[in-house]
Image (cartoon, rainbow, N blue to C red):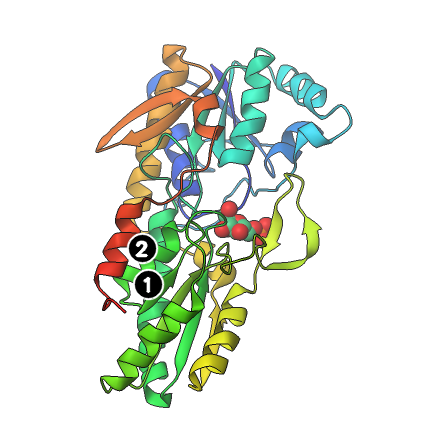
Amino acid sequence: MRVGILTGGGDCPGLNAVIRAVVRKGIFHHSDQFVGFIEGWRGVVENKTMPLTIDTVSGILQLGGTILRTSRTNPRKMEGGIDKCLANIKANQLDALITIGGDDTQGVANALVQKGIKVVGVPKTIDNDLSGTDACFGFDTAVSIATEAVDRLHSTAEAHNRVIVCEVMGRDAGWIAITSGIAGGADVIFVPEKPIDIDHAVKIVKERHDRGKSFSIIVVAEGAKLAGTDKQATQGAKVDAFGHARLSGIGQTVAELIEEKTGYETRSVNLGHTQRGGTPTAYDRMLATRYGSAAIDLVHEGQFGRLVVLRGTEITHIPLADAIAKTRTIGDDLIALADGLQPEL
Ligand code: F6P
């Protein structure tokens, strides 16, 4: 079969591992040919392609980023965008398309499924917020980077008797914040799923200082909102082609409020895109490889309009439409776990 592959949306560690697994399994076991679309949906709209062979996917398993590059291009927002996609898929004589991306990418994929294109999706995002799967590859690497940062902030915070607020990514889901916060031993963790209660954080920090601790660490998700407001902190008013604002700045706001209300010197650090860069963890390489291998097998089983997912320890698949229906946010259990490690104040 001739199969197209694209990587869309924000990059994340493990994309290359998926591409490699699809291509190796497809060529070695199904005698497939592959066409790589460059820069996500932009490549499909503009017919920008590159060949994908055993040679082109050699040596990429451990590399961050994506050899296909990516973009936040949304064909549904472009004049004739979907029709151009259909025409270029036909021009490349593709029997199927594998879309590696998050909810935005899979939303476009699902629109093409409605037009008769044979698509299999692979769930990607460091935010870990796609419904229907227990894990997206890239999340484990992002959490490892954030946890290491939280570890490192401890020593400098302690040396200076400071409070340090660490802002992490995750958009509307608190997976990175709660996981790196708990794993890194943060004293306060703010997530988008629960309004930020500054006064409670002030009590936690003061109680620590009363116990003789001279520093505190606060982890805050970029999408967390102050109690009493429905607005997320953003960098400018710009939105991307899928309507998402650039979330940023809540860490600094929290730091200013904490310093004002406690009198303790406070700093904020925003980890930003550092969380998406560099080599994937072994867990993400493994998950990405399992997803890639399952995706090309699904193509040969004729199971289209499906997304490969992880349920427990098994790889299975669900309708693409189910995955994009809603954002998978963190549960009360994780919030309770974090709260249980702090005194009741
Ligand atoms: O969706 C992944 C993500 O890293 C979010 O956590 C973050 O809000 C966003 O992408 C940043 O997007 P960009 O790379 O376009 O600035």
- What type is the residue that disc 2 sits on? Thr
Q: Give coordinates of residue 344: x percent, y percent.
A: 24, 66
Q: Is residue 142 visible?
A: no
Q: Position of residue 290 (x, y in %)?
A: 30, 32
Q: Residue at x 49, y 59 (%)?
A: 227
Q: What residue is rendered at 26% in x and 85% in y?
A: 210
Is 226 on the left-hand or right-hand side of 46?
A: left
Instruction: Name which residue type carries label 1.
Output: Thr
Kindly identify which numbered label has been placed on residue 179.
2
Front-lying residue, 44 or 228: 228
Q: Give the structural element (helix, strand or loop) at label 1.
A: helix
Asked if residue 157 lies left or right of residue 88, the reply is left
Q: Reply above or below: 150 against 108.
A: below
Q: Nearer the viewer, residue 240 or 253?
A: 253
10 Å neighbourhood of mark 2: few (<14), some, or many (≥20)? some
> In terms of secondary structure, where does tag 2 sit?
helix
Quadrant hosting residue 209: bottom left
Tell me what residue is drawn at x 33 percent, y 80 percent: 206
- Note whether residue 131 is visible: yes
Residue at left 48%, top 29%? 324
Whether residue 247 is situated above or below residue 344 in the rendered picture: above
Q: Nearer the viewer, residue 268 or 333?
A: 333
> Residue 81, how many percent across, how many down?
72, 26
- Cα–Cα span, label 2 and label 1: 8 Å
Instruction: Quarter of the image for the C terminus: give it.
Output: bottom left
Q: Which residue is mark 1?
A: 147
